[in-house]
Image (spheres, rainbow, N blue to C red):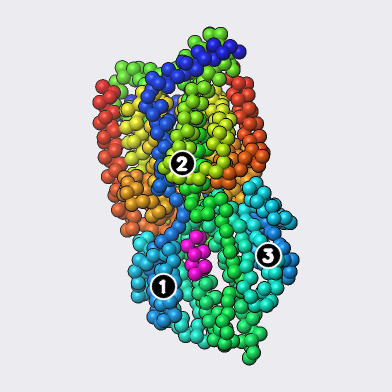
Amino acid sequence: MKLMRTWAMARKEFIHIFRDPRSLGMGIAMPMILLILFGYALTLDVDKVPMVIWDQNRSQVSRELVSRFLGSRYFSLQGLVNNYREVEEAIDSRRALASLIIPPDFSGRLASGHKAPLQLIIDGSDSNTATIAMGYAEGITMRFNQDIALKEIQRQGGRAVETPIDFQPRVWFNADLESRNYIIPGLIAVIMMVIAALLTSLTVAREWEQGTMEQLISTPVKAPELILGKLFPYFCIGMFDVLLAVLMGEFLFHVPLRGNVALIFGMAAIFLIGTLSLGLFISIVAKSQLLASQIAMVATFLPSFLLSGLAYPIRSMPVVLQGVSYFIPARYFITLLKGIYLKGVGPRILAGEAIFLVIFSLLMFILANKKFKKKLV
Amino acid sequence: MWERIKQILIKEFIQILRDPRSRAIVFVMPIVQVLLFGYAVTTDVKNVSMGVYDQDNSVYSRQVMDRFTKSGYFQIDEFVSREDQIREFMDHGRVQVLLRINKGFGRDLTAGRKAPLQLILDGTDSNTAAIVLGYSSKIVAQYSQEILADRASRLPGGGPLFGQVNLETRAWFNENLESRNFYVPGVIAMLVMLVTLLLTSMAVVREKEIGTMEQIMVTPITPKEFILGKTVPFALISFIDVILITLVGVYWFEVPIRGNLLLLFLATGLYVMTTLGVGLLISTISKTQQQAMMSAFFFVFPAMLLSGFIFPIANMPEVIQWLTYLNPLRYFLVIIRGIFLKGVGMAILWPHMAVLAVMGLFVLWTASKRFRKTMS
């Protein structure tokens, strides 16, 4: 392997990239747009669920319950309704996602020591929002019940009673439960996957399609030199994207970075080599740009977004998919990023993940080299 | 003219289906995506791994643990025996929550004093943490309530009766709150966009890049015929994908389909006009497939994220919510989810259909006008 020939390959690739400023610009702008969208616009957090209320009881107790619902930041009143048809209409037209129905004998049943039903109708089509909203509603009723019980015991027993258990939940690492704080670091991994998929998956296929591969084959350049040379320019772009992402996280989104910055860049470099090699591997195997672009989509972007634990908890998936997720390198990288960013932990704790990344990158690089044959078929 | 269109269609189909791997990917792509979205995309939180630091070792502390495991959400994976292990387990991520029961917990409860109970949550994944927090508050509140009831019953005179509110929740349209019912129909919208927009633009640009465009231009084929020949195959493939996804969704994932299938195809047709149009537009401004691919994703990513496919539009800032009205995906998603889950028909969906139709005609018209200009 000669450094000179590798550099010549890299220079050729650099020229290709700079000759097409639009693709380069998009390669840099796309991560920024993704970060901005996720930082500002996209959230799975649920609050102010629009709600209509049908209070058939109109008593002091029912008003008290209603005010508990509206006093929480989780529900917002869209209107009071007077019959079932209006409830249906509000939910069908998506004006309200939830509807609280208080039956006529609500306060009567409570006063006589019975169970008083309270109905909550919820639009289940978005199951995530519905589940969370249901949890909120249950919490509110639970506290309401507890207060009733306390008051009653107090009245009978004649002395003050307290709730038996003083529940003190503490959230570590992300005390305000800001989703931004974990989405932004995690997104760095997805972005690098996208860059690899979009940029490198076409490079070798393009040479085949345009017929320039024959010319390359006739030169003395060897496979590893060609692959390293092709990787290098995209590696630079990828690292630049990481730098941008880290800077945006710091200055725009104020994501706490508690660990070592150098560790982030070091790990990112290892991960990048792996994903770029994967992109090249796809390109070498596909030999057609159209095909390569599709394989890259299926093999890189989707799994790293869906199976990495970034947006969806891996432990809730079926066992088979949990197994598959061990083969998704983004999973390890995201664990690393979250650990460094939010927990501030170092190499001692993250060694396992780091080793996996190194293995993945080596494997992909070797595979790309193996698969690339300087032969005309 | 029809003969020429037929010939160019044949050529396109040969080109797409010649390579066995291309043939495979036409079918593999939708299946993989449906399976991923059907299985992986679930925001339900289950099997939360829990550590316990029980310094009390009493009947009460064991009861608390029991409540957590019996709830079905938690699974005790680790027992902590030293203070410093808490930090270590949390740092390693070996447990997501750690329940800490201080010495004297049971004594406080029997004496009628307030007994503190601490739960440490790993907040790195805030969405999961919020849900877990909800679950655990509920479990503790329930336990607390039972102790209260028990105490009340031991008051002189058998204790007071107190009424309780019984919350009965009913979820409409998706009774069991299955995530897949929400996401699987959405995959149709995403995949159709990918196939028509990305593949069309790349297929057209490929002719330019390889130089076969010149050959086509010397034939008597008119631009209109060329456009038809390039778009119809991908439109057909996307319809095949729609059928495939619907079949897998309905028969494998048991996603309900309550509305009219013909309406679904009609809506897909309207939607495809827009995506094909955008694909053609991209092909007119791109010289290489790389450019076409980048431009396509530049459109597809924001379109997917700002459509309500995964992230609710209602949660977005107002300015961005306005922006989503320009997104064809937004309308199509309302239509397919309406057809699949709610079983609603034209009466409710017509405004969305109308917008898609207008958008489709406009984009397609602009695209073919531009296309004819660049070709000549």
Question: Residue tagged by mark 3?
Answer: B102
Q: For this view, does A350 lie left or right of residue B209?
A: right
Amino acid type at circle 2 is: Gly
Residue bounds of the magenta highlight? A131-140
Q: Is residue B62 above or below residue A114?
A: above
Q: Which residue is drawn at 69% across and 52% down?
A: B84
For the stretch drawn in magenta, the main secondary structure is helix
User: Residue at point 65% right, 54% down?
Assistant: B49
Q: Name the amino acid, label 3.
A: Asn
Amino acid at pointer 1? Ser
Say whether disc 1 or disc 2 marks the residue closer to the N-terminus: 1
Label 2 resides on the chain identified as A
How far apart, in angstroms, are the residues tagged by discs 3 and 2?
39 Å
Percent coordinates x, y for residue A214 in the rendering:
50, 12
Q: Which residue is the site of mark 1?
A: A67
Q: Which chain carries label 1?
A: A
